[in-house]
Image (cartoon, rainbow, N blue to C red):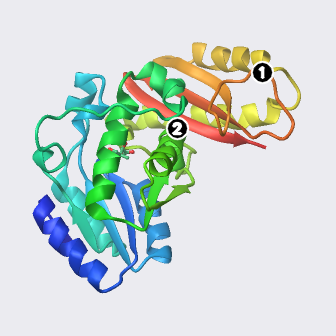
Amino acid sequence: MEVLKSKKILQDFIERQKEMGKKIGFAPTMGALHNGHLSLYEQARKENDLVISSIFVNPTQFNNPEDLEKYPRDINRDILILKNSGLVDAVYIPEVVDIYPEKAESKHYDFDGLENEMEGKSRPGHFDGVGTVVEELFVQVKPDNAYFGEKDFQQLAIIKKLAKKNKIPVKIHGVPIYRAENGLALSSRNQRLHEDRKDASKIIFETLKKVNEWFHTITIQEIKDRVQDVFDDQQGMKLEYFLIADEETLKETDFFYKGRSFRAFIVVIVDGVRLIDNMHLD
Ligand code: PAF
């Protein structure tokens, strides 16, 4: 596996691959790799000649400086995981200046309103930061296919919109949420939780499954009240938001409409760690 530590080294590498006509699959990450990331590479491996990942903790997508500071970083561990997985041909580990040659600042995007819902409300400027780094990585890596986890469903929708509106020639793929045995969605942030809190956090997935059961029998307001009650009873957990939204517009809905697809979205703070999850409602 090649470790590409600057934009120049990456560009030479990409040029050689493109000359050989290789189809490139790309999965950008912020490191602290886990099995959820490996599931992105597995899918990329099946559909491309070459799999590239990147590791870059993007400063512009953190609206909270403490969150940026606390974000887990262990580059040597990550490189070892990638090498041992045998799934990745090259990892790009840029310096801040390779992505932001002048100032680490976001561009401003219009994602047709997707950026104003849910995480956009809770984390102002977050999606401008994500859009800026992902667009720059697409320009540099020139992937044919790119892979993102459905755990960050809104991010996935926004990146699809980014590629479409900016006519970036890349196909965006969503990869199903990878869960621990107890159902907790895998996230780099889980590393900050003690084992007993990880165990207690399975309540998030269990609640989403119940929502899927309740979905045809009671109103959305009743579902929301029940979810609030579940988390009011959990010590050390705070429900930041729970809502049901249209899968395409991501707008919250109070009623179900025939012919539309809906998804439940939830954010819970567990001992100061922000856990996010979602589920398609059948
Ligand atoms: O999902 C992430 O890890 C990040 O938001 C991404 C897409 C790598 C951009 O920094």
214 to 95, vertically: above or below: above
Q: Are marks 2 and 1 in contact (CB under 8 Å)?
A: no
Q: Is mark 1 within 8 Å of ligand 1?
A: no
Image quarter hosting the N terminus:
bottom left
Q: Quadrant of residue 233?
A: top right
Q: Position of residue 199 (x, y in %)?
A: 50, 37
Q: Position of residue 51 (x, y in %)?
A: 36, 71
Is 135 situated left or right of 234 in this image? left
174 to 60, vertically: above or below: below
- Residue 201 seen in the figure: no
Tell me how far mark 2 sits from mark 1, CA to CA: 20 Å
- Residue 95 seen in the figure: yes
Q: Nearer the viewer, residue 197 or 281?
A: 281
Q: Position of residue 55 (x, y in %)?
A: 25, 53
Query: As shown in the figure, which amino acid type bears the numbered disc 1?
Result: Ile
Q: Residue at x 44, y 34 (%)?
A: 196
Q: How many marks?
A: 2
Q: Which residue is mark 2?
A: 154
Query: As shown in the figure, which amino acid type bears the numbered disc 2?
Result: Gln
Instruction: Give the farthest residue toward the bottom.
Output: 20
Q: Which residue is mark 1?
A: 220
Q: Quadrant of residue 190?
A: top left
How would you rate the neighbour count of disc 1 (Cα within 10 Å): few for under 14, some for 14-19, many for 20 or more?
Answer: some
Is 27 situated left or right of 68 in this image? right
Task: Tell me which image quadrant ligand 1 sits in.
Answer: top left
Q: Secondary structure at mark 2?
A: helix
